[in-house]
Image (tube, grey):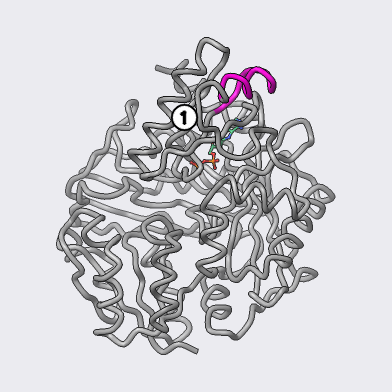
Amino acid sequence: MFSKILIANRGEIALRVIRACREMGIASVAVHSTADADAMHVRMADESVCIGPPPGTESYLSIPSIVSACEITGAEAIHPGYGFLSENAAFVQVLEDHGITFIGPSSDHIRLMGDKITAKDTMKKLGVPCVPGSDGGVATIEDARQIADDMGYPVIVKATAGGGGRGMKLAKSATEIDTAFSSARSEAKAAFGNDEVYIEKYLQKPRHIEIQVFGDGKGQAVHLGERDCSLQRRHQKVLEEAPSPAIDAETRARIGKTCADAVAEMGYSGAGTIEFLYEDGTFYFIEMNTRLQVEHPVTEAVFGVDLVREQIMVAAGMGMSMQQQDLVPNGHAIECRINAEKLPEFRPSPGKIAAYHAPGGLGVRMDSALYQGYSIPPYYDSLIGKLIVHAPDRPAALARLRRALDELIVDGVETTAPLFYALLEEKDIQNGNYTIHWLERWLEQSA
Ligand code: ADP
């Protein structure tokens, strides 16, 4: 087992990993930018190293700084969290070349899945159903028009290198394809330095259902059921739950096995998520994330596993402790992403935390790096906490969520907590009756 792990991240996910390390008797190293010198992850880790100025590109995304921090502190492995370098194949390649263990899959698997066209192609060959679309990249506007005409509108133009909902443009009819194509390309170029795009059939009423998979890198893999992440704003998840109100045990077992078999066949190592759109009883693969997801706690709650511990065990070559027959979901879990944002515009609201009180009690987990007196810097993602509740069934989980929100106090900055109160009042939310378009429509109507 490793004696020291460096966490190449910040905020709540850095704490999440530090906590797992501590329980496993592994020393932790935090890295931080100058803006984060007082951050909770720096305080909680056993050691810390300043790796640069505030902008992410000069600190949390700086490969030389992070590798140097590893060498200075003697850390043997790096946990990337999510975001930042977690899906950067070049970074993982550097670690592989320098004998530092990356807690995650190989650079080859990251590269394979990081390019969405290759990912779809690979999954199709492994028997995973995909969204109908262009075979590969679409290079010219003439091709885009032709493909969209053949497929039928609406279509969505997506960046091959896409992530975080960027580089994605809808064309409802032929009059919109030229603009969708050119704006998806320029957005992709700006965000990812790669303007390749592809085209998919735009599904009108799907749910976003994703399957948590885990491989031991030696051809064994399991699945831990699904998460329903249909409540989205601008293609970004807002609330996630497990199990999905739309999936029964037989469907779960079937799609779960398809996914576990696919990653076993790939020889995949560590945690991964296979994302689907689900409409009229059919699954359509959209992408695979080769890392721990923000919403992993709902799976941990329902299956009673520690996914970070499993990641560390597999990376250390000790194998995973999970076996498919033991993985039986129990109860219902819901996660709310609480952002420092002002409603209704969702405008970032950084600033000093005047008071903070985390909810507690049975079935409540608050993953947050907040503390009273902390100043949220303006440079990073606005996620400040994840409130996760777990209860025997969905109605009890909704009641617990309301109770936990009542207990939460974050003073000094605006947060998105009031959004979840409002959502809990909605019949469709109470009944689990929503698609990926529900929240956008609701926000429009309530504006
Ligand atoms: P990203 O990597 O940027 O998150 P994804 O491919 O995972 O992009 O898609 C994110 C979200 O965008 C999906 O959850 C869904 O809401 C929407 N989306 C993506 N592809 C389609 C599609 N073919 N039809 C309808 N909505 C889609």
> Which residue is labeled 1 in the image?
422
In the foreground, 171 or 388: 171
User: Three-letter amino acid code at disc 1?
Assistant: Ala
Tell whether 326 sits left or right of 434. Answer: right
Which residue lies at the image location 24% right of the left edge and 39% below the top edge?
Answer: 349
Which residue lies at the image location 27% right of the left edge and 50% below the top edge?
Answer: 380
| x, y percent for residue 31 | 26, 70
- The stretch in magenta equals 144-156
Residue 271 colored magenta?
no
Quadrant housing residue 28: bottom left
Which residue lies at the image location 63% right of the left edge and 52% below the top edge?
Answer: 274
Residue 148 colored magenta?
yes
In the foreground, 426 or 45: 45
Quarter of the image with the C terminus in it = top left
Check the image and report above or below for 320 versus 25. Answer: above
| x, y percent for residue 91 | 39, 66
Check the image and report above or below for 205 versus 4. Answer: above
